[in-house]
Image (cartoon, rainbow, N blue to C red):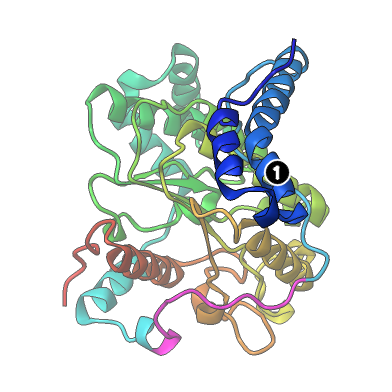
């Protein structure tokens, strides 16, 4: 049985009308291909689909994973559209008043924990209520990292149970926790933990409720505890990307800002000798790798604070630090101003009402 194209009949009439003397070999070849090519294409496509159905079962398209390998070369990235350091550090009267007020405080971690845990007592687990009682009755006892983690989890549970919207969700180490409340809004929640490593933050992320989406997520003060332990850049980079991937999986539509790892001040400006373990050349390498790895992911923004807080040698200016390593209120203010500027530029939400 011979298969014949449905175009064969009209094609035969056309050939008869033209006559053999007007038909060139090239035209005849073209017409024959035109009449049979459609059937050949359909039959080949059907065979491919049938064969693939046995070898490749259908699966939903997977979202691309964050690459853990830095590019072979790392040329400087173009700076994002951010204001100049002069513009950011031109503080208003209200901003100076906040910094003056915060600068007069002496942060006592033990007292702060007792006050916060008293306010969140009903959200603490029975185990951590007992822990709080031990700390409260023994002046030599200080809260551990586990106590802070429980405290911040209780704060998060309070927000969930009260049905409060979350504007900015802040994660990180004590550098993040040190952001003064005066620079935050009521709908911001700061889950920073003293001495929190990236694996601690990953555990926090895994406990977040995917049904309650913040408007924005900020990672600030990450990597510093690992640098103090002299972990390798490759380990810190991998742990950072794991945290970011967990955040993307939990909140696929929420913008994420990773703030650059902070360098340290000059050796003679450090208040503790062990802070010299933070190698600024390693900090620069880590930030450069992360900036390039994240450049292709529009959900994640890498915010480099270095142009605003470092000197021409890459050291953290002492005016931006409490001890030569940890950020102070001025650094936090620079961060908030940059976030507000970028968010207003992109129409996410209006800047924080600090005042003129």
**For this view, does 42 lie left or right of residue 159?**
right
- When the figure is inspected, residue 270 is found, relative to residue 63, above or below; the finding is below
Image quarter for residue 91? Answer: bottom left
SS under mark 1: helix
Q: Which quarter of the figure is the C terminus placed in?
A: bottom left
The answer to whether residue 142 shows anywhere in this view is: no
Residue 60 found in image quarter: top right
Q: How far across and down, in percent of the image, does residue 92 sit?
A: 24, 81
Residue 101 picture location, percent across and down: 28, 68
The residue sitting at 62% across, 20% down in the picture is 59
Is the residue 165 above or below the residue 181 in the image? Answer: above
The x, y position of residue 83, in whole percent, is: 39, 81
The overriding secondary structure of the stretch rendered in magenta is loop
Q: Which residue is mark 1?
A: 239
- Queried whether the magenta region covers residue 78, the answer comes back as yes
Q: Nearer the viewer, residue 23 or 120?
A: 23
**Residue 24: image location, x then y, percent:** 73, 56
Residue at x 41%, y 67% (from the top left corner): 329
Camera-side residue of 330 and 299: 299
Q: Can the viewer see residue 110? A: yes
Identify the residue at horizontal 75%, vertical 68% (top origin).
285
Q: Is residue 177 above or below residue 151?
A: below
Query: Where does the magenta region start and end?
Result: 74-86
């Amino acid at each position: 049985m011979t298969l014949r194209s449905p175009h064969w009949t009209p094609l035969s009439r056309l050939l008869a009308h033209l006559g053999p003397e007007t038909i060139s070999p090239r035209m005849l070849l073209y017409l024959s291909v035109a009449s049979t090519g459609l059937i050949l294409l359909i039959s080949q496509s059907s065979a491919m689909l049938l064969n693939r159905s046995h070898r490749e079962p259908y699966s939903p398209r997977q979202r691309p994973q964050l690459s853990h390998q830095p590019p072979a070369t790392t040329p400087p990235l173009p700076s994002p559209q951010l204001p100049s350091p002069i513009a950011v550090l031109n503080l208003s009267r209200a901003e100076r008043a906040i910094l003056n007020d915060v600068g007069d405080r002496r942060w006592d971690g033990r007292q702060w924990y007792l006050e916060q845990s008293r306010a969140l007592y009903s959200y603490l687990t029975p185990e951590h209520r007992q822990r709080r009682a031990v700390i409260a009755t023994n002046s030599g006892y200080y809260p551990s990292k586990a106590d802070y983690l429980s405290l911040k989890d209780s704060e998060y549970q309070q927000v969930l149970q009260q049905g409060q919207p979350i504007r900015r969700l802040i994660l990180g180490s004590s550098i993040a926790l040190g952001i003064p409340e005066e620079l935050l809004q009521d709908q911001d929640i700061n889950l920073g933990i003293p001495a929190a490593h990236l694996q601690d933050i990953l555990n926090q992320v895994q406990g977040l409720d995917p049904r309650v989406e913040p408007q924005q997520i900020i990672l600030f003060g990450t990597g510093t505890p690992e640098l103090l332990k002299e972990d390798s850049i490759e380990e810190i980079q991998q742990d950072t990307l794991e945290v970011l991937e967990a955040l993307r999986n939990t909140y696929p539509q929420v913008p994420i800002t990773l703030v650059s790892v902070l360098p340290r001040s000059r050796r003679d400006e450090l208040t503790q000798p062990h802070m010299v373990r933070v190698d600024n050349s390693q900090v620069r390498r880590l930030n450069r790798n992360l900036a390039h790895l994240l450049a292709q992911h529009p959900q994640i923004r890498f915010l480099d604070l270095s142009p605003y807080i470092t000197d021409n040698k890459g050291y953290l200016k002492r005016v931006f630090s409490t001890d030569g390593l940890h950020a102070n209120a001025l650094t936090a203010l620079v961060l908030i101003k940059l976030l507000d500027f970028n968010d207003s530029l992109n129409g996410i939400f209006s800047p924080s009402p600090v005042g003129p």
